[in-house]
C-alpha cells in the first residue's frame, strides 16, 4: 500500500532479527520517504501489524513464503552460506547441522494460525517502538 497506493516510498522493508545469546528479537518494518509522508507510512505499517493479529488468508501466507523458500533453495548453492553459516558454526554449535536439515521443512510447515498467534503475542503496543527520522535544516 505504501508503494502502490500512496506512492510514498519505493521500497518498504520488513525483517526479523534475533539473538540466541540474549533470548531477544525484533520485527522491524520501515520505509524511506519524504517527511510529509512519514505519518501516512507509519499509519499503514501499524494497520498491517494489527491486521496480522486478526486474520491472514492461506493465499497471503503462501505468497509471503514463496520468496523465502526460493531464497533457501538458492543458499544451498552458495559457498558463502555453507562457509559462514553452516561450517563456521557447526563445531561450537552442532545443532546448527540439525537446523540445516530441518530448515526447509520448518519454513514450509508454518501455518496461518501460527502466524496469527505469534503476531498477537508480539505485535502489541507494549512491544512497539516508533521512530521517525526527519531531516532538519542547518538553521534548525
Image: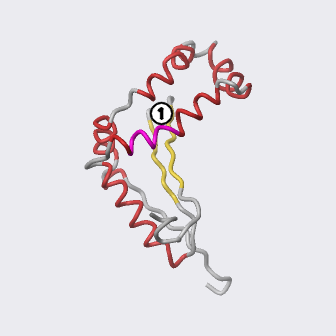
The answer to which image quadrant residue 24 occupies is top left
Q: Residue at x 58, y 59 (%)?
A: 11
Please identify the quadrant where the C terminus is shown.
Answer: bottom right
From which residue to which does the magenta span run? 60-66
Taking the view exactly as shown, the residue that stands out farthest to the front is: 59
Please identify the quadrant where the N terminus is shown.
Answer: bottom left
Q: Of 101 and 73, which appears nearest the observer?
A: 73
- Secondary structure of the residue carrying tag 1 is loop
Q: Horizontal and vertical percent for residue 104?
A: 50, 24
Rendered image coloring scheme: secondary structure
As drawn, is 10 to the left or to the right of 54? right
As for residue 44 lying within the magenta part, the answer is no
Residue 103 vs 91, above or below: the answer is: below
Q: Residue at x 57, y 74 (%)?
A: 34
What secondary structure is the magenta-colored segment mainly?
helix
As drawn, is 74 to the left or to the right of 123? right
Q: Which residue is drawn at 53% across and 58% down?
A: 12
Taking the view exactly as shown, the residue that stands out farthest to the left is: 54
Residue 39 vs 86, above or below: the answer is: below
Q: Horizontal and vertical percent for residue 27?
A: 45, 46
Q: Horizontal and vertical percent for residue 115?
A: 34, 39
Q: Mark 1 points at which residue?
A: 22
Q: Of 17 and 107, which appears nearest the observer?
A: 107
Q: Of 92 and 74, which appears nearest the observer?
A: 74
As for residue 63 lying within the magenta part, the answer is yes
Amino acid at each position: 500500500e505504501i508503494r502502490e497506493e500512496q506512492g510514498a516510498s519505493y521500497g518498504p522493508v520488513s525483517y526479523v532479527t534475533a539473538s540466541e545469546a540474549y533470548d531477544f528479537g525484533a520485527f522491524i518494518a520501515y520505509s524511506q520517504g519524504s517527511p510529509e509522508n512519514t505519518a501516512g507510512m507509519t499509519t499503514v505499517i501499524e494497520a498491517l501489524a494489527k491486521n496480522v493479529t486478526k486474520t491472514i488468508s492461506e493465499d497471503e501466507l503462501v505468497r509471503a513464503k514463496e520468496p523465502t523458500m526460493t531464497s533457501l533453495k538458492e543458499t544451498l548453492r552458495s559457498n558463502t552460506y555453507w562457509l559462514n553459516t553452516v561450517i563456521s558454526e557447526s563445531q561450537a554449535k552442532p545443532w546448527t547441522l540439525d537446523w540445516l536439515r530441518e530448515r526447509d521443512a520448518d519454513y514450509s510447515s508454518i501455518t496461518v494460525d501460527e502466524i496469527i498467534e505469534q503476531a498477537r503475542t508480539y505485535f502489541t503496543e507494549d512491544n512497539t517502538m516508533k521512530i521517525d527520522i526527519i531531516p532538519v535544516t542547518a538553521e534548525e
